[in-house]
Image (tube, grey):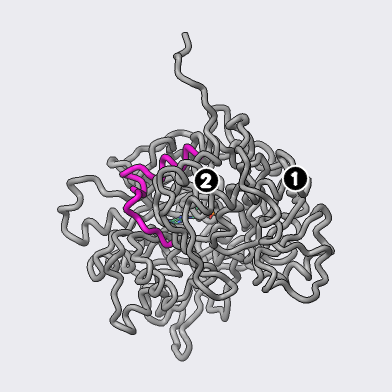
Amino acid sequence: MLGLMQDRPLLISQLLEYAAIYHPKVEIVSKTVEGPTHRSNYAEIHRRAKRAAKALAALGIVMGDRVATLAWNGYRHFELYYGISGMGAVCHTVNPRLFPEQIAYIANHAEDKALFFDLTFLPLVEKLAPQLKSVRHWVLMTDRAHMPKASSVPNLLCYEELLAAQSEDYAWPSFDERTASSLCYTSGTTGNPKGVLYAHRSTVLHSFAVCMGDTLALSSRDSVLVVVPMFHANAWGLVYAAPMCGAKLVLPGPHLDGPSVHAQIEAERCTMSAGVPTVWLALLNYLTETGKRIDTVKKFVIGGSAAPRSMIETFQEKYGAYVIHAWGMTEMSPLGTTGMLKPAMYDWPVQKRLDIQQKQGRAVYGVDMKIVDDEGREMPRDGKAFGRLLVRGPWITSGYFKGEGGSVIDREDWFDTGDVATLDADGFMQITDRSKDVIKSGGEWISSIDLENAAVGHADVKEACVIGIKHPKWQERPLLLVIRRPGTALDRAGMLKYLEGKVAKWWMPDDVVFVDELPHTATGKLLKAKLREEYADYKLPTA
Ligand code: ADP
């Protein structure tokens, strides 16, 4: 017997419509690329999103068409998120930090019909335009005064003029909640980028989750500085969740340096912010140099890569801002876990509490999670055993756009995250490695990340990277690559001596190589696949 509740579809347009009715005056503040700070609110943004939807229809965009954005965090990008998805098209956020060839590949693969872009990216788009085969409309996200006198981009349109030509008289269409809403390509450390195609339903459910008290506890009392870019995994869902609860949004554009972030926090009395560790490092350096404070901030969400223990400690102990360590991935909309402590843990001594907060957090309701060995057998949740981390849930991918990469889930919907992790009895997950980076030695696994962390503890080490090298007896053994700090003279013996006692004896690297640089992806992650290729024939001294 089925229940008798209404089967109303969950649609992205409803999020903004709700905010326009119940939080009309709540502000959306943007640092624009044109210069000045722009102030708007949910009521106005809702009206403009409707104009944007009508402008798209006038350009011939129909349901299912991909409309690309190449833009910073700002109000125009925000209203486009809603205008595009709300009218039934797919908002394809393109990461401008990718290499130009990757951007061209992505736009062609997605078959984008239109491209909306910030002034900053005009030179990039001029260069790329001849390669973007499917794009029919090029829209510069600015007003007439800032339009270039001449440009090689064909029929360049002015965003504000497109909006001005439309009225606000528009009712959001209703359709199947499983309709595709947005598209984001993973940066792909191997092979070509792959598209993750979100749906209205998955996005709305993810927004509920973001607002939950034990997830990010977003609410109408928050003023959120959205440091995490809207072109990378939907700004971790904050730009959808904020209108759901009426939170104020502060959109920083490209201004993510320490002084700018501090100034925006002060000016807008931000209570919360979210971003990757690099940005917070810059902010903390600035605070240390100037002695300034950030007293309005109650919580920082840190994710994308592991939050360093010292960063969590400094934010909490020195600045009184709670750190929510979060983990997720583009394929997961992106939230999987957040590090909200359980009640008793708040009373723990600082160092014991930090042990837990350094982990990546607990599964958000809606995300099933388990760790398995190479044969797929579930491993114990004892905080020690580590295995491949599998997830499933209503905002987790079931396959990449256009079937790229083949099937990615098993018969029970489990998706392999590519991460290797432990789970403890309290449910806290800790990433120990990427599965392709973990070193398989004599049937046991060695965490390359743990070894790297131990190595960078040495004062002379600027950066460290550990890769597995084929070994006749052990299958693989670790090789440590080190960039020395300028002016230091650390050698192999000194490095190995330092690691003694800090890692298990059988984890000790078989060799240490000093290098001048290490390759990184466009998003700053170590390109270990490239290093493995480069060192494929490396002879370990003990082999
Ligand atoms: P990319 O940066 O490659 O485009 P994602 O942003 O989707 O892709 O990256 C997801 C991956 O980032 C995760 O699978 C995990 O390896 C890593 N990651 C995300 N958050 C954390 C975290 N808090 N700690 C450690 N690793 C993390």
> The residue under label 1 is which amino acid type?
Ile
Identity of the residue drawn at 55% across and 36% down: 11
Identity of the residue drawn at 55% across and 52% down: 233
The image's mark for residue 333 is 2
The image's mark for residue 61 is 1
> The residue under label 2 is which amino acid type?
Ser
Task: Give, as a single range, the part of the protein colored magenta.
Answer: 204-225
Identity of the residue drawn at 60% across and 38% down: 172
How many numbered badges does the structure rendering display? 2
Q: Nearer the viewer, residue 243 or 256?
A: 243
In the rendered image, residue 242, in percent from the top left (x then y), is placed at 43, 50
Q: Gap in Å between the C-alphas at discs 1 and 2?
A: 25 Å
Whichever of labels 1 and 2 marks the residue nearer the N terminus, that label is 1
Lateral position of residue 531 relative to residue 373, left or right: right
Identity of the residue drawn at 23% across and 56% down: 353
Q: Nearer the viewer, residue 514 or 17?
A: 17
